[in-house]
Image (tube, rainbow, N blue to C red):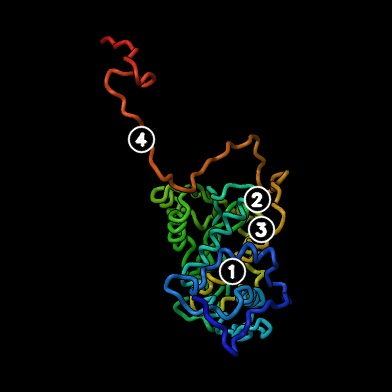
Amino acid sequence: MTRTPKEGDEAPTARKRNYPSDTTDAEWAVLEPLLPVPACRLPWGGRPEKHPRRNVVDAIRYVNDNGVKWRAVPVDFGIPWRTVYGFFQRWRASGALARIHAELHEQVRLHDGLNPRTVAVILDSQSVKAAETVGADTRGFDGGKLINGRKRHLIVDMRGMPLSVMVTPASPHDSIPARDQLFRLSLAHPEVTVAWADSAYGGTLTTWAHTVLGLTLKTVPRRKDQDGFAVLAKRWRVERTISWIMRARRNVRDYERLISHSEAHLTWTFITLMTRRLTRPPRPPRSQPHPVEPATTHNPKPIRIRTRQPGTIRLAPVIPPGTSPSHPGGKDTLSPTTP
């Protein structure tokens, strides 16, 4: 049943793309099929959406990329700021945002000619200052970085594409929230078998990950002659991902009252990154290894990963007594063993 437009209703019109954060036609072709189904198309029905979804997505990306307040959404989007914030909150609360992120991650890996599932990941964290809008119960003081705010915990694959994002107060040691994050990762991605991290994730966490999750956690220590920041093997990939986060000005400082909204802004940053990656030519593999990583002398064997469970289970045929496994239909041709 369709709703008849009434006088005063705003017609969904295409707006001119004025901002760098706006979606291109190629990006919208990738992102539109992943968005939740409108309520008016569901069996229980709902009010038809008044504003084009592309304008809604562009407005959310504008807030995320430019770091403005929700009340400062430009009027040329043609959408009230409360409506934009409502879509941002509903898609986050319903789990649609996490589903879009997971599907885009698999598409990016397929786009680059890789297996959609990865078996190796890298862990790291980033402490950021919190604004006065962040309550005392969701913030803490990081004694190592001397930052009063929140901490972002990231798990990325070997291309730097994030698999898991979690935000906590900055006060706990990295190894404490890492247990929760690794447990969630094992549920969503049971194929992951090895992870690299810095020395802060060592100690009992390594034993716990191997015993409970069956995950090999390897630490990449600092160099003996290191003074300040230095590019380290494996860890440079997640450090590069953190630099991608800081391109979106909303992520430079944490302004969100809810931790879930901080995670949503990080997820939108990665969604924008991956949609743009899908509209460009695939990234060729490295012709030479990274300077800080040793070169491999042999080609590793390809790994086959079953991403979906089979619909049926094949059972081995029952072999009657006296028949040979190699000749099920005949007599046993093996000679009996003598004592």
User: Judging from the image, what secondary structure is the residue with disc 2 in?
Assistant: loop
Callout 4 amino acid: Leu
Quarter location, residue 268: bottom right
Inter-mark Cα distance, 2 to 1: 21 Å
From the image, tell me which residue sits under label 4: 315
User: Judging from the image, what secondary structure is the residue with disc 4 in?
Assistant: loop
Viewer-proximal residue among 133 and 30: 30
Residue drawn at x 51%, y 64% is: 98
Most distant residue in the bottom direction: 8
Q: Which mark is residue 278?
A: 3
Inter-mark Cα distance, 4 to 2: 37 Å
The reply to whether callout 2 and callout 1 are in contact (CB within 8 Å) is no
Callout 2 amino acid: Asp
Sequence order check: which comes first, mark 1 or mark 3?
Answer: 1
Please give left or right for residue 51 compared with residue 325 in the image: right
Q: Residues within 10 Å of mark 3 (few under 14, many from 20)?
A: many
**Depth-wise, is mark 1 or mark 3 nearer the camera?**
3
User: Judging from the image, what secondary structure is the residue with disc 3 in?
Assistant: helix
Callout 1 amino acid: Trp
Q: Is residue 336 above or below residue 43?
A: above
Picture coordinates of residue 318, whole percent (x, y):
31, 28
Q: Which mark is residue 112?
A: 2
Callout 3 amino acid: Leu
Viewer-proximal residue among 72 and 151: 72
Sequence order check: which comes first, mark 2 or mark 1?
Answer: 2
Q: Is residue 100 above or below residue 297?
A: below
